[in-house]
Image (cartoon, rainbow, N blue to C red):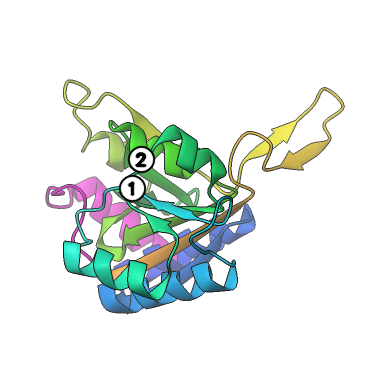
């Protein structure tokens, strides 16, 4: 088993353990086909309360947007607070994934990215398989706080517990999280070469499988 496969399998195990659904596809075309299928099954339509909102994604071209809206009427790429609050689903592209916690991470400096991942009941997260990192230290070595205003960490669906430790899903955010890992997907950010510590962590994961 290669290090990258071990890292993905470790991520999938931990993400599913906290309630996320994880799917792996070979390329962007397969990812868009999968997402369109999910949206159709969810009843997305061009009607109030039945739409989906899709934040800006570097991987999605104008031609992709036209094809998606033709196949699934009701997808909105112009995201506002109002249409995000009324949407069934929100879709966004994440920057990284952390294998040790099953977390997806995004530099969410623009408001549309935050709206689609917090207001709809279903969040679909696109992630490049190549952007999987072993742990938080590996991520922090890639983030420049002088250039990053908002860093979002998402681990499973929204969870809330009261003083009696009664857990409720989806009160302060999406009740469902679907993570679509794509082998060939342009990343949101250009990642540096893996550091020595990254390689050691990945090798340890491969050995542990």
Q: 104 or 168, which lies in front?
A: 168
Name, please, the residue furthest toward the right: 164
State which region is magenta: 184-209
Q: Where is residue 171 in the image (x, y as percent from the top left)?
A: 69, 36
The first of marks 2 and 1 along the sequence is 1
- Seen in the image, is 41 located left or right of residue 129? right
- Going 32% across and 27% down the picture, which residue do you hit? 150
Q: Mark 1 points at which residue?
A: 55
Indicate yes or no whether the magenta region holds residue 1.
Answer: no
Indicate yes or no whether the magenta region holds residue 191.
Answer: yes
Q: Position of residue 64 (x, y in %)?
A: 24, 68
Give the label on residue 153, or none. none
Q: Would residue 206 be seen by someone viewing this image from the given angle? A: no
Q: Position of residue 194 (x, y in %)?
A: 17, 52
- Going 17% across and 25% down the picture, which residue do you hit? 147
Q: Is mark 1 on a helix, strand or loop?
A: loop
Q: Residues within 10 Å of mark 1 (few under 14, many from 20)?
A: many
Q: Where is residue 32 in the image (x, y as percent from the top left)?
A: 35, 72
Q: Name the residue under label 2.
A: 113
Vertical placement of residue 174 versus 20, above or below? above
Q: 73 or 111, which lies in front?
A: 73
- Seen in the image, is 143 located left or right of residue 72? left
Q: Would residue 107 be seen by someone viewing this image from the given angle? A: yes
Vertical placement of residue 96 versus 33, above or below? above
């Amino acid at each position: 088993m290669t290090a990258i496969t071990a890292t993905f399998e470790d991520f999938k195990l931990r993400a599913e353990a906290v309630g996320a659904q994880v799917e792996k596809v070979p390329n962007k075309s397969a990812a868009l086909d999968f997402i369109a299928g999910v949206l159709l099954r969810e009843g997305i339509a061009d009607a109030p309360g039945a739409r989906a909102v899709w934040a800006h994604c570097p991987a999605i071209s104008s031609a992709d947007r036209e094809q998606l809206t033709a196949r699934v009427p009701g997808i909105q790429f112009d995201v506002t607070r109002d249409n995000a609050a009324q949407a069934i689903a929100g879709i966004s592209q994440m920057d990284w994934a952390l294998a040790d916690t099953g977390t997806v991470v995004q530099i969410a400096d623009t408001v549309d990215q935050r709206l689609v991942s917090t207001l709809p009941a279903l969040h679909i997260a696109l992630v490049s398989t190549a952007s999987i990192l072993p742990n938080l230290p590996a991520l922090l070595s890639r983030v420049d706080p002088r250039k990053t205003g908002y860093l979002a960490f998402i681990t499973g669906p929204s969870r809330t517990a009261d003083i009696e430790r009664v857990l409720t899903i989806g009160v302060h955010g999406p009740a469902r999280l679907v993570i679509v890992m794509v082998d060939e997907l342009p990343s949101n950010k250009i990642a540096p070469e893996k550091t020595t510590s990254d390689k050691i962590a990945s090798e340890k994961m491969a050995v542990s499988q």
